[in-house]
Image (cartoon, rainbow, N blue to C red):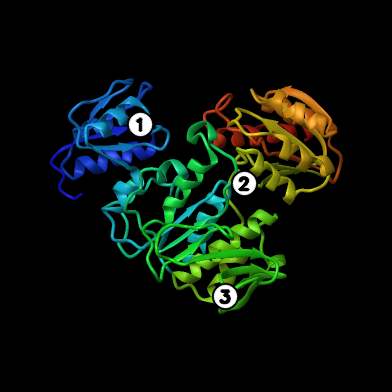
Amino acid sequence: MTGGTGTALVVGLGKSGRAAAALLRRRGWRVIAVDGAPQVAPELEELGVEVRAPFGDPVPGVDLVVKSPGGPGEIPQVAVARAAGAEVWSEIELAAREMPNPMIGITGTNGKTTTTELTAHLLRAAGMKAVPCGNQGIALAGLVDAVDPAAWLVVECSSFQLEDAHSFHPRGAVLLNVTPDHLDRHGTMEAYTAAKLRLFANQVPGDLAIAPAGMAIPGRAAARTVAEGPRTGPEVVAWSQGGLHLDGVGRVATWEEMPLRGRHNRQNALAAAALAAHAGVSPEALRSGLTTFTGVAHRLERVAEIGGVLYVNDSKATNPDAACAALDAYPEGVHLIVGGRGKGTSFVPLADAARAGVVRAYLIGEAGPAAGADLTAAGVPVTESGTLERAVRDAAAQARRGEVVLLAPGCASFDQFANFEARGEAFRVAVRALGAGAG
């Protein structure tokens, strides 16, 4: 792509869109950047990018479209350009074409960010240069021309980003899991899964590909898997047997030594350790990294203990399956805060998971009533709190010493918050207010 001479259209002015527009302009493209909402982007205008926001019409005469993750491929600006012969890339596709760095790709419905951060942590524990980036971190395009070419880039990839990735080639790649999510965007589980599987499409023999057992993957790398319990077959690259084991290495660390909590985090750790070992990390460095990694903000984050009650922020549990994983980590004495904007998925599995250990659920946001109906049907008492701040106060009034107030909403945040980070920070603020009142 270096030295573009045509016209590029960037659709969406979030972090990845801005990084893509700046990169394209540096490479000599005429760049038009559009967004459906009002946006101010003086840093792009200074580079010569033509910013149109708000703007929703097709743009004729473009040679390349770089689509931000939030924009469906069916929107007129993308569909019209594609029909006219323009190439359509995601931001990670654009950036990867401009970087010589070795890359690791991580996707899945749940666990992407924790696994991405842990993999980079393990590489750095071995003295290697590594940068976590992508979906929840630094935009990959923002690293072009700004990072050591020898550094490993650990790229968190969403299904939206992979939809238009054509030549992206990670040397190590993992699909952690696939459960119903984003069906409002993809339409079917088959389409959602197909987008995730594009991560493996350009791998070659010698690359590491990790996917759920029995799942066929594209590309030329042999599929490996991680397993709970003793090793069950030659394709297993990492397994749990009183601790974390790796193929060809044996036990690396016991689970008691590792701060991460919950069965889902064991799966994340197995995958991260296998990816890091593939990149050349020694067993000793792996153990050091696994035992010093304390987790990621808004993912089973211990906020405070007040009056013997633990307050845990899992705002990143943005679908029911992720909320179930949080309940696996805290199986008893839970006061669960649930709700937000639904994604077209059922709350019945969450209600089933809550039946045994949830003392009471506190409902917030648009999807609170729907979640409450399924929880009530499962025999879980509910309180209609409405807002997160009220839910924290309601839960604090009910919780007893030794119990847990757990924010695991099982929903997106966009009905009441800008994003899940803002929701998690609001939870922290509300919990701190409890502590101040107790003082």
Tell me the CA gap for discs 1 and 2.
Answer: 27 Å
Tell me the CA gap for discs 3 and 2.
Answer: 28 Å
Amino acid type at mark 2: Arg
Up the image or down, 260 lies above or below 140; here it is below
- Asked which quadrant contains residue 407, the reply is top right
Camera-side residue of 91 and 310:
91
Q: Residue at x 62, y 66 (%)?
A: 291
Image coords of residue 89 (percent x, y): 31, 42
Amino acid type at mark 3: Asp
Asked whether the viewer can see residue 104, the reply is: yes
Neighbour class for label 2 at 10 Å: few (<14), some, many (≥20)? many
Image coords of residue 286 (percent x, y): 55, 70
Mark 1 or 2: in front is 1
| Disc assigned to residue 12 | 1
Mark 3 secondary-structure assignment: loop
Q: Are marks 3 and 2 in contact (CB under 8 Å)?
A: no
Asked whether the viewer can see residue 132, the reply is: no
Up the image or down, 375 lies above or below 231; here it is above
Disc nearer the start of the sequence (1/3)? 1
318 to the left or right of 92: right
Image coords of residue 187 (percent x, y): 51, 34
Q: Are marks 1 and 3 in contact (CB under 8 Å)?
A: no
| Disc assigned to residue 374 | none
Amino acid type at mark 1: Gly
Q: Quadrant of the C terminus?
A: top right
118 to the left or right of 90: right
In the rendered image, which residue does mark 3 sit on? 247
| Disc assigned to residue 299 | 2
Disc nearer the start of the sequence (1/2)? 1
Mark 3 or 2: in front is 3
Mark 1 secondary-structure assignment: loop
- Asked which quadrant contains residue 289, the reply is bottom right
